[in-house]
Amino acid sequence: MKPALAFVAAAPAASQALPPLAAPPLRSGPAGVHGAARRHALALGIVALHLLGLWGLTQMPQMRRTVAEVAPLVVRVVAPAEPSKPVPPPSVAMPKIQAPATPLIDAPAIAIAVAPAAATAIVATLPPAPPAAAPVHAAPTPVMPVAPPAPALKQVPASAVRYLREPRMSVPLMARRLKESGVVHLRVVVDTHGQPREITLAKSSGFARLDEQALQDMRSARFVPQTENGQPIEWEVIAPMSYEVDR
């Protein structure tokens, strides 16, 4: 504690101002020394408090980490959100199908005749039978006249055939070069005028060129007509045509 200072106050005069206060003289001796020591200790304490405050500010991050490590860990379990349920498709109203009304057919009324008490003979009258239809005779199917079979042609041997103009005999050039030779037998149908009406191959010579040439050569032939009972007739003959090439 600071030492008490004694002030002596003089009574102010009415016409004079108050004089300035004079500082008390410092005391020397043991009491003054103790006061200075106290002031030094107080100043050191204030400085120490400031230093302690600065040190505390520098240690704040470490203290926060320590508090965070020491503080209990609170775990909150959050329930998972329920999955959204699928929205059902909008129901489509089905058209009402009405079954067609079945027409009701009234059952025919059946009249039941009650027999009289007395037995009475009932005679049923039957309708007359319809007249029998007259038989219808179908028209007879017309019979087509059947043409009589053509008379068989007269077969004339080749030795009995006489020519008005003999068929020309020419050997094809290619057959000459290939030295093709052979006899072609032709079936010739001659009409009533002695002209060949139908010429077919009866037997081949073995060479197609000679067969074709023989058919062409026979068309140029003319025959003496054949008669039977004084009437000219058609006839047929198997005529051989020989094609020989000098080898």
Image (cartoon, grey):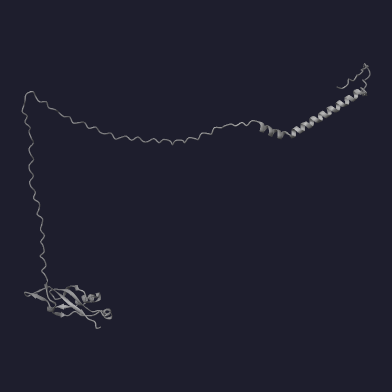
Q: Position of residue 3 (x, y in %)?
A: 88, 21
Q: Where is residue 91 in the image (x, y as percent from the top left)?
A: 41, 35
Q: Quadrant of the N terminus?
A: top right
Residue plotted at (90% across, 24% down): 32
Q: Where is residue 115 in the image (x, y as percent from the top left)?
A: 10, 26
Q: Nearer the viewer, residue 184 or 129?
A: 184
Residue plotted at (79% across, 31% down): 50
The answer to whether 234 is drawn above or below residue 13 in the figure is below
Q: Nearer the viewer, residue 215 or 29?
A: 29
Residue 75: quarter of image: top right
Q: Which of 46 and 224 is in front in this view?
A: 46
Apparent side of residue 136 relative to residue 40 in the rendered image (left or right): left
The residue at the far bottom in this view is 246
Q: Is residue 219 visible?
A: no
Q: Position of residue 44 (x, y in %)?
A: 83, 29
Apparent side of residue 6 relative to residue 78 in the rendered image (left or right): right
Residue 159: quarter of image: bottom left
Q: Is residue 222 visible?
A: yes
Residue 236: quarter of image: bottom left
